[in-house]
Image (cartoon, rainbow, N blue to C red):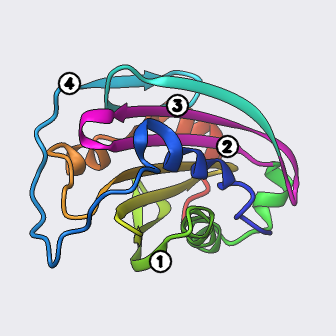
Amino acid sequence: MKTSRRVASLALLWSMGGLGACASRQTAPEPRAVQSASPSAVMQSTEGGFSVALPEPVSKESRAQVTDVGEVTLHTFVAVRPESDTAYYISYTDFPPAVMAQAKPGDVVSRASMGALESLGATGLSSRPLTLEGFPGWEVEGIAGARRLKGRFYLVGPRLYQQLLLHPEGKPPQDAEGFFESFRLDPQVAAMLSGARRS
């Protein structure tokens, strides 16, 4: 099952809020946290079954997307900090349970992360498996021009969660780790989705 079409909308992030603009790249930059103008607030998606700390405002969109396994709905949540040329992205997609039951969860999240890099034209720098509350996940880091990205992908039953942060190379936002570590699943939704199926 191909994943690159599932994450094609991530390319939209590259052009949002100036993220597609050229930026001068410093030689051997030392990563430094960028002060944020707007503090993050915890956003909860009842339908999505998750919560996460994001700067405000958050734009939400749901749209149909054709994939190799049929039409699915991609639900996205995006926050942009134009002053630091940074974008925070969360999405979830429910795939047909019968198809996902035949797939190996670790392979699904690994391929999703590679598809995200591909759709953004990024070169992978690192990748590793991880878990979230017992569910399989994958973390990837990459670079495309003067932009750095970090993403985490989790599979909860037939639902794929994607969490991405894009920022200028060498200038991670101060809340970068907080953004990733704040992502939580609603236990009731996770139980309903998984039917006790874990990694």
> Does residue 18 sit above or below 124 in this rendering?
above
* Magenta stretch bounds: 66-95
Report which residue position mark 4 lands on. Answer: 38
User: How dense is the environment of label 3, judged by Cα within 10 Å: few (below 14), some, or many (20 and up)?
Assistant: some
Spot occupied by residue 7 in the image (x, y as percentages of width and height): 65, 55
Note whether residue 136 is visible.
yes
Q: CA distance from mark 2 to mark 3?
A: 12 Å
Q: Is residue 118 left or right of residue 89?
A: right
Does the magenta segment cover residue 178?
no
> Nearer the observer, disc 3 or disc 1?
1
Q: Residue at x 31, y 57 (%)?
A: 23
Q: Is residue 103 left or right of residue 19?
A: right
The answer to whether the residues at label 3 and label 4 have Cβ atoms under 8 Å apart is no
Q: CA distance from mark 3 to mark 1?
A: 31 Å
Disc 1 secondary structure class: strand
The mark that comes first in sequence, 3 or 1, is 3
Report which residue position mark 2 lands on. Answer: 93
* Closer to the camera in the image, 153 or 171: 171
Q: Is residue 154 left or right of residue 44?
A: right
* Closer to the camera in the image, 15 or 13: 15
> Does residue 99 sit above or below 87 in this rendering?
below
Q: Is residue 81 left or right of residue 107?
A: left
User: How dense is the environment of label 4, judged by Cα within 10 Å: few (below 14), some, or many (20 and up)?
Assistant: few
Q: Residue at x 13, y 64 (%)?
A: 31
Report which residue position mark 1 lands on. Answer: 123
Residue at the right extreme of this rendering: 70
Q: Amino acid at mark 4?
A: Ser
Spot occupied by residue 160 in the image (x, y as percentages of width and height): 61, 50
